Amino acid sequence: MMRDVLVIGGGPAGIAAAETLLSLGKNVTVVDSAPFAGGVPLELSCKGDIECTRCHVCMPRDAAARIRPSECLEVVPMASIQSVAIEGDVIKVNAKISPRYVKPDACIGCGKCAAACPVVGALVAPPHGSIPNAPYVNRELCAHFTSKKCNECAKVCPTQAFNFKERSKESRTEARAVIVATGLEPIDPSAVQHYGYGLYPDVVTSLDAERIISKYGELRKPSDGQKPKKLAIIQCVGSRTTKGGVEYCSKFCCKYGLRIARALVERSPDSQVDFLYMDLRTFEPRADALSWIGDKKNFMISQGVAAKVQMSAAGKLAIKRTTQGDASIEEGEYDMAVLSIGGQPRPETKVLAAHLSLPQDGFGFISADDAKRRIFVAGSCKGPMDIEESFSDGQAVGARAAACLGVRQ
Amino acid sequence: MSGNKVCIILSDCQSCSGLSNEDMNRMLGALKGGAKAAHALIVKAPCIKESRKEIRTLHIEGCDRAVVGMWCHPEKIGALNWLPKKMSPSLIEVVDLSIFAAKSTKCSSQVDKYVRVLHASAAGLAHAEALKDRKIPFASKSVVVIGSNDRAKDAAKSLASKGIHAKLISMEPMPGVNAENLEVIDGATTEGLKGIPGDFRIAYSRKGQRKETDAASILLVSERCLSKAVPPKDSKVKVVPLEQFRNYSAGGAKVKGMAFLDDLQTLTTAADPVTPAWHTLLEAAKTAAANHMADYISVIARDVKAAGLLEMLWKEAADAGVKFIRYDDKSRPKISKEDSTISVKDLVLGESLDIPADVIVAPITTRPWEPMFIERLFLPSDWDLKSRLRGPQRGTAQSPCDGIFMVGYAGFNKLLDIAEPELDSAVAQISAFMQKGCHVARGAVAVIEEGKCSACLTCVRTCPYRAAIMNESWKAEIIADKCAGCGNCVAVCPSLAIELKNCTRPQIGAQVAASTEVVQ
Amino acid sequence: MSDKLKIVAFVCENHAMSAIRAASIAGESLPESVRIIEIPCTGRLETPQMLEAIGGGADGVAVIGCLEENCYHDIGSMLARGRVNRIKDILKDISMEPERVEMINAASVSGAMLMMKLRQFESRVASLPVLSLKGAIQ
Amino acid sequence: MIRAERKPVSEIARMLAGKKKVLVVGCKTCVAIGHAGGEKEVAELVSALRLVNAKEGHGWQFEQTVVERQCEKEWVRPIEEKIISADAVVSLACGLGAQTIADMYPIKQVYPGVNTMFLGVPEEQGVFVEKCLACGECVMFETGGICPVARCAKSMRNGACGGSADGKCEVNLETDCAWYMIYERLKLQGRLDLMTKVVEPKDWSKSHAGGRRKIVRKDLLIQPTDRTGTEVKK
């Protein structure tokens, strides 16, 4: 049936646009390829220990939790867009929804299935601020599909919300306006061999580190589950390079790197954290961005990007890096390395922009929207943005879309 | 303890609670047993339509309030219009017992814990009183934008284009700004603010007269950031502010060396850092290189903050011949007095260089951020500092008071490039706020007991919403329409003169006692 | 060891409660001995209430509020931390263990970390000598 | 305002050893405004003492009350029977209030619950700073409104002692040197000549050094004048 606005992509920008549209009296459908609408912040963890470090992870998720109960909002998760057609002033989109194996309205959020599931990562419980607020079964890992017929979760579920026979289905949506908010895709650093991602288990990307912290509440080494005593945070991985990455600066990794460093330093004063960066491109003045260091001893910040990560004789990670000032090469031994990876446009953004005939720049970012045909673009699919900026942009574009649909003032 | 008016309603969702029938009856017996509730009964699961109707028309004589024990989050059932009609909504407490259930072990061993949780809620609810939130329609239809920079102008214009009557109050004259339903009050300084969201009264003084205007919502737009960077006088170097580089570059003669600085503070002893707009700095450097305004063009910066796609602009400037030099905090660049060069120790190359710099272009922001600006405007007195440290709890531009939005340096101390989307988002939030059309004054507010106040001003200083003020008879008074019911004033008052409705001291004491009691 | 232990947790209804609800949906149950009391903001809590909680038989008092500078009511968790520190001084002064009272800051998204901190607090309180109060506080 | 700070609870508990009925009296003016002895602090002290009582079993029974101003006899009289029926009275008022009760009921043991500290102002919420010594002879007018007696650690009268480093007093590095501030203030007011004025030593007999002091207001005194027609004696 006819909706006012269709938001493609439920990340910070999509959620912000949806919230603004709902408060301006429009009904919204949010289509997202992930199991939960909420985007990358759903996998990120809070970086604050006592004081808030303003990483803005909770801002879009709280907004999603606020708009979740409203009836004028419809969320279609795990949907991959098949075709987009513009007939007259109606935009028709049909998408294929892959099976979730859980009926969201039946789930009462009691959490017993998440406790009962034997395989780590098979049953993904809904994090705070995810829409729909029901778990999702990862078909590759779930023992029901891979090996024996295990249905621990179905046995425990009080409302029989599990339905393993679910098939993927079609969904057709028509709307009078579309907001493209497909966001960014993390850059895979394994293309850059000298960081050793994929070779050494304790070299993790920032997203892996976030998943570990969100799951266990603290950072643990994937190799043996212990807390790392000495770790390095390497900035600009995959960004600002011409070999194995993107040429532009991904803008959010500096803000992210400093906050994950602060979280690790403040939560475990006994572990040593080294922060290796090229340029500090945070948005506050430099003094404010580094004011939290004070006289903490277990934090070292050095300008000079890590050149090489190897396994040292003692089984630790040996990281070669340029040092400040005298531009020599130094090597340090670390238990763990967190690669602060950048972001690049998703393949779906390129396909979608082609469908909607939106102009794209050299890197695949959408460079302009088309208000006449009521097609808008919000968030980091226009250019690298951090969570806060894409949230503001989402609100702005949401209001613009509502204005073009005629808001009664 | 007058616990007799409370009735505990337990929903017998067998499957969701994991309790067998006789567990449920044992629990009902324990609930009746405690002296906390006058009445306890079991109802069918509220997720079934008929049972919702039945609960709606429930009548329990002698009980005007109820604790409803449920086994899933109320949001799953949808709107809470199925609760007993005869009881005031503020006297019904819905408890989600699934939070307390042990996720893996057998549930029947949990009955005592559930009973204790319900008893604690009942003990607290016994002292509650019926409250109602009041909807106060907006008295004014206009929005006041305060700021004397072109971002404030854009904000006011875009609000006016959205059909909202906008008033722009700016300190500096704003010639030639006229649009349909936009009223410009320039050359005015704001004096103070009173009123509640939707009905603000802003006092301002213009040409010596003190006037007042009404507003439903306020947008504070401040672009300037604090800077006392004074260019060095005794050297022969010419300093061009970055903001005026465009008209300088039109007529500027060719010089031997031109240096762009990220922060003039490095050459002077100014305390506060300047946050330059890197987009304008890189554009200026590129145009300088493009029309050969100097033989040696350099950008001297602590960090080259060309974030995002600006990196491409940096690459273009570098290809056009601009040299980028990074210095360290400890070894700052210095202007030599005799010839016009800047000596700086390059961080990457490691040795110190003498950069020819007949002309220095640096961001020198002129108008300082006015601390008094915030003090007069309803926000807590030390808010101007705190506003920069505010967390994301209310989104990007929202201040603690509904209806007041802050953008640019008023919001976060961010680089000016970021203020663009933030401004549009603030305008979006204002149009959403105006769409609401009414301000909800909470029922559960703090109330000051007559005569107990010793006028110590602590609540006035503490209240984040500026709802506590001193009235004419020099006693504290809490404006009920502004209070958000956080209770911080209740805890700081030295004379225990303030009490928060439905969260009073006896209620918390009763809940603490009930939860530490051993259930038989 | 923890069935007899009683920990009273004053939880702020904004970020802290949604963190606990999210953790419960993700399958992490509350530690056995924690009893939750919901208050509009941790800034509402007063020192006598915490002392009466300990006197009334609680072995530990946890005050769970929002992160500082991200508090929904802006200053609540800062004031609460100040009062918890004052209670710690009083407890140390009357030779009781100050570790019985703790301030925990949690954002709505850090459910797992909050449960970990609560479990750590519960084990710390359990390791303290049993609180033998002859008469409860009248 | 008179500023006070509550004594450690253990010290108060030691005073109450062996007592049964304990009355804790607060005061609603200076110590309430200074968050030291108001109703909130009375409640806090009573719950802390109850905890001590539950822990060590002293068998105390507490009664808590607050009077408008404890340094006035008329305000203390309304709680007379409470005082008489109590074995010990803990007064959370400043020294004046505690001694008023002690003088009115000499047989009662009145214990101070707070240490009366100084006359001070709130520098920030929760931070109280001493700014007056009540030395009996105010000289503030010739030092630009900054009292050198109270705010200089050595009460210098003729300029700084010379030990201060970048404006901070050598005795306590947190506090500003009073004479540094006086110089800045006089420079602002254009009265720098006062810095060079030599002032004779201070007459400390007007302060507490001259024994307990007394103010007599003839216009308020309700007393027959002395038959011999001489002035009323000091």
Image (tube, coloured by chain):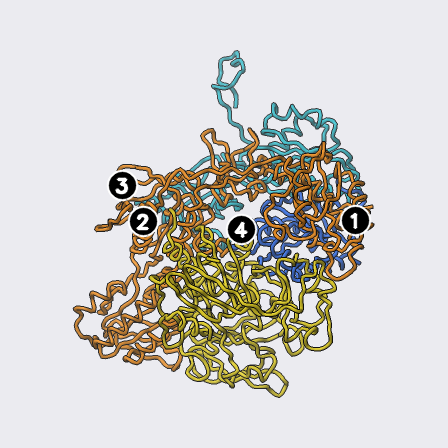
Colour of the chain lettered D: cyan
Colour of the chain lettered C: blue
Q: Which one is closest to the eye, mark 4 or mark 1?
A: 1
In the picture, measured across the screen, residue A243 lies left or right of residue B280, that is: right
Amino acid, disc 1:
Met
Mark 2–mark 1 distance (CA, rounded to whole Å): 61 Å
Q: Which residue is mark 3?
A: B206
The residue that appears at 31% across and 74% down in the rendered structure is: B299
Q: Are marks 4 and 2 on the same chain?
A: no
Of residues A307 and A11, the one nearer the viewer is: A11
Q: Which residue is mark 4?
A: C72
The residue that appears at 31% across and 54% down in the rendered structure is: B154
Colour of the chain lettered A: yellow
Q: Which residue is mark 1?
A: B24
Colour of the chain lettered B: orange
Mark 4–mark 1 distance (CA, rounded to whole Å): 38 Å
Amino acid, disc 3:
Arg
Q: Which residue is mark 2?
A: B160
Mark 2–mark 3 distance (CA, rounded to whole Å): 23 Å
